[in-house]
Image (cartoon, grey):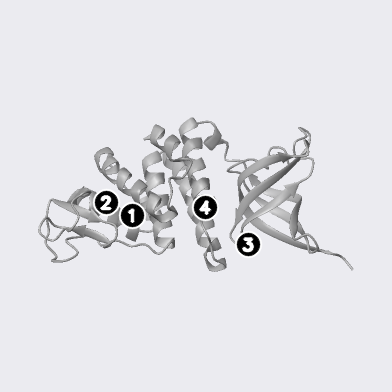
Amino acid sequence: MSNEKYSTTDAIILKYQTFREIDRNFTFISPTIGIQQATAFGAEKLKSRFCSVVQPFVKTKLFLSLSQKKNLYKLDDVAEVDTNDFLRKDLHFIYLSSFYVDVFLNTFMSSEEYKSFYHLLLYSFEVLKEKKDLKKSFLFFVTKFLILSGYGFHLSNCRKCGELAENYFFDLKKGGIFCYSCAESKNITISSKTSLLWKDFFEKRFIFLKEDVVDKEDFFELFPIILEIFKNIFEKELKTIPILKEIF
């Protein structure tokens, strides 16, 4: 009786490291089994069919065998490979994609969320591929990640009194924007124009957001707010934040 269980899944490779000089241990995200690790034996050999596939950001179909005794995946074959070479040809694309991977590797995902997180990464790459737009891809990724993590903010008017104003104060703990009279914390300002743009990213579907224009001024108003939110979520500054700041 076989001690191995076989499975096939779509996947995006997140990272790898060389193991025993010729093999690669790699981490991937799958819409069905989430974030997992597997070993690609011989992948460091240039003639190996796995050499160019087991690379960061590659989308492929993995044929895996799971040792039930050791509970470890082994890569048996690949198909439908999309190497996403465009990501590795631009240093800023590499930096931004590395941030996405960093976020995923620090996130707990329930089995019900695997598919959503997988497609979040897929669509974020698609924005880079089709629009070459770093700001839009970033805003899409972080906003939809916040939704999947259970965050939502009141961004249309003052959360307390409903007043419409040109400028507000953002309060993370109280979940939205507040006018001057209602704000308890006046540390983070945000314009009405910027808050409505962010509201669109929370509410619109991917197909519509792809066509939205992200103004440079609005983006740089949101950027430090988002970094502060992520620092609060992870209770630390992620290791890719410094290189993220080099992009924007």
> Relative to 70, is 94 above or below?
above
Mark closer to the chain start, 4 or 3 = 3
Q: In whole angstroms, how far apart are the C-alphas of marks 1 and 4?
A: 23 Å
Closer to us: 107 or 152: 107
The residue that mark 2 highlights is 197
* Three-letter code, disc 4: Asn
The residue that mark 4 highlights is 106
Q: In whole angstroms, how far apart are the C-alphas of marks 3 and 2?
A: 34 Å
Select label 1 or label 4 by which is in front: 4
Q: Contact (CB < 8 A) between labels 2 and 4?
A: no
* Three-letter code, disc 1: Phe
Select label 2 or label 4 by which is in front: 4
Seen as rendered, the residue at the extreme right is 1
Mark closer to the chain start, 1 or 4 = 4
Label 4 CA crowd tier, 10 Å (few <14, some 14–19, many 20+): few
Seen in the image, is 207 located left or right of residue 26?
A: left
Q: In whole angstroms, how far apart are the C-alphas of marks 1 and 2?
A: 7 Å
Question: Where in the figure is residue 239, as x and y percent of width and height?
Answer: 48, 41
Residue plotted at (35% across, 52% down): 229
Q: Quadrant of residue 178?
A: bottom left
* Three-letter code, disc 2: Leu
Question: Where in the figure is residue 21, as x and y percent of width and height?
Answer: 77, 35
| Secondary structure of the residue carrying numbered label 1 | helix
The residue that mark 3 highlights is 33
> Relative to 199, is 95 above or below?
above
Residue 238 visible in image: yes
* Three-letter code, disc 3: Ile
